[in-house]
């Protein structure tokens, strides 16, 4: 690998780590309803597990309510079953055409658990980013040993990878802080 490839690879992998964190945080409940709350929900329909997005549209008609409108009315019972079996903690209300989910207000205890979950997700992302830095530094050392890059270029790569690491860790910290604030406010 040359210097450009090492930096490019590290950047792409760190971006993926940020995307994984975004997806994880979108599933963490706040006091408000968001379609992200049911994104991880899988429904057994047509003989296989399907993501809810593929079999229904999810909207937010009110700040504390989700509206799930199946594309096929025959799937409504399967969706209800999946919601009840999930750990969402919400009871589906169906009128035969749509399912309404009322998002209950969060207790202080639940909020604290959610904040600790946010911290876990953020730490997983930071560890992932640091592992990517380690891999990039190892690649730079190997390239220098193989005489494909000079010692100075290796050091430049390590410096730029460290700057990338700092940049992405700062993003993780900011995202976690924002989500914690959302969870703790009413």
Image (spheres, rainbow, N blue to C red):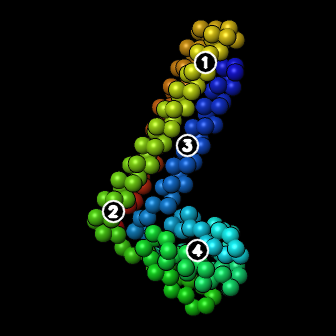
Image point (67%, 75%), residue name: 45
In the picture, the disc for residue 59 is: 4
In primary-sequence order, the first of circles 2 and 3 is: 3
To which residue does mark 2 refer? 111
Note whether 80 is above or below 153 in the view shown: below
Side (left or right) of 6 relative to 105:
right
To which residue does mark 1 refer? 140
Write down the quadrant of residue 51 in the picture.
bottom right
Write down the quadrant of residue 48 in the picture.
bottom right
Note whether 36 is above or below 130 in the view shown: below
Residue 102: image location, x then y, percent: 45, 79
Residue 100: image location, x then y, percent: 52, 82
Neighbourhood count class around disc 3 (C-alpha, 10 Å): few under 14, some 14–19, many 20 upward: many
> Could you give the CA–CA distance between mark 2 and mark 1, rounded to whole angstroms?
44 Å
In the picture, the disc for residue 17 is: 3
> Could you give the CA–CA distance between mark 2 and mark 3, rounded to whole angstroms?
25 Å
Asked whether residue 181 appears in the rendered view, the answer is: no
Q: Nearer the viewer, mark 3 or mark 4?
A: 3
């Amino acid at each position: 690998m040359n210097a450009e490839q090492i930096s490019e690879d590290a950047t792409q992998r760190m971006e993926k780590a940020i995307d994984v964190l975004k997806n994880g945080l979108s599933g963490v409940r706040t006091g408000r309803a968001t379609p992200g709350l049911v994104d991880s929900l899988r429904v057994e329909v047509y003989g296989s597990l399907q993501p809810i997005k593929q079999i229904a549209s999810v909207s937010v008609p009110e700040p504390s309510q989700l509206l799930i409108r199946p594309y096929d009315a025959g799937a409504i019972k399967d969706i209800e079953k999946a919601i009840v079996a999930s750990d969402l903690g919400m009871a589906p209300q169906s009128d035969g055409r749509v399912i309404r989910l009322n998002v209950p207000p969060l207790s202080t205890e639940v909020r604290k658990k959610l904040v600790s979950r946010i911290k876990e997700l953020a730490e997983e992302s930071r560890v992932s980013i640091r592992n990517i830095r380690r891999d990039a530094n190892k690649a730079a050392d190997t390239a220098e040993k193989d005489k494909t890059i000079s010692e100075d270029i290796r050091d430049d790569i390590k410096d730029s990878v460290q700057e990338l690491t700092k940049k992405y860790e700062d993003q993780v910290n900011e995202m976690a802080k924002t989500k914690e604030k959302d969870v703790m406010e009413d």
